[in-house]
Image: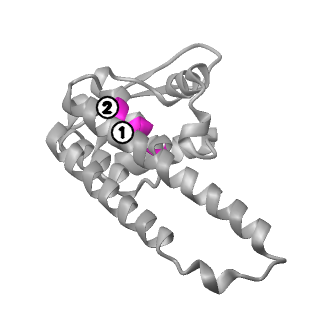
Amino acid sequence: MTIQIFILSSLMEERNYPYKLKKKINDLQLQDLTSAFTESKLYYHFESLRKQGFIEVQEVLHEENRPDKQVFAITEKGRSAFPKKIYKLLESSETIGEMVIGLANIKYVDREKVCTILENKLEHLQEKWQLLNNIDQGQFNDPQTLPIREFMQDYVNDRHQHAITYLTRLIQEIKDGKI
């Protein structure tokens, strides 16, 4: 979904062709954000978006001694679907890192709706953290497992507290118009 959002966001700005976007992904070093990016995946997603009617070929560029380049543009259907894809990405993401492409395109969506999605995630995360903190530690009193239990408890607490802190900050920065 991240690759499709990247493609659609690029086409919201200008008509483009797959190879140029591939170079842009490489230049921006977005491979980590697009989960196992490959050139074949990029072309697969262009074709998928075309079949869904979200993008269409606008022209074909012919260059001597080079393959033809299909230049794509986003359709009205694609413009309409684009915010929905961003909302879906934000809802399904488990970390802020997974949300980056969606957050980078926040200008195309309703900020209040984004905040509502993130506030729901925050509430769920806080409930989960509270649940983890309320686990009866007495059932794990085996002296042999105490060091690993304490290590894992610290690790989980730190991860949850870190996620809560940054999700809270993200929501506030969106509300303040900084993001």
Residue at image location 26% in from the left, 51% down from the top: 119
Main SS, magenta region, reads helix
Can residue 58 be seen by looking at this rendering? Answer: no
Q: Residue 18 location, x and y as percent?
A: 50, 30
Q: Which mark is residue 105?
A: 2
Residue on which disc 1 sits: 102
Residue 154, picture quadrant: bottom right
Q: How busy is the neighbourhood of tag 2: few (under 14 within 10 Å), some, or many (20 plus)?
A: some
Q: Quadrant of the C terminus?
A: top left
Residue furthest to the top: 64
The question of residue 166 being in magenta is answered with no
- Identify which amino acid the numbered label 1 is placed on: Gly
Circles 2 and 1, Cβ within 8 Å, touching? The answer is yes
Distance CA(mark 2)–CA(mark 1)? 5 Å
Can residue 66 be seen by looking at this rendering? Answer: yes
Q: Give the range drawn in magenta.
A: 98-104
Secondary structure beneath disc 2? loop
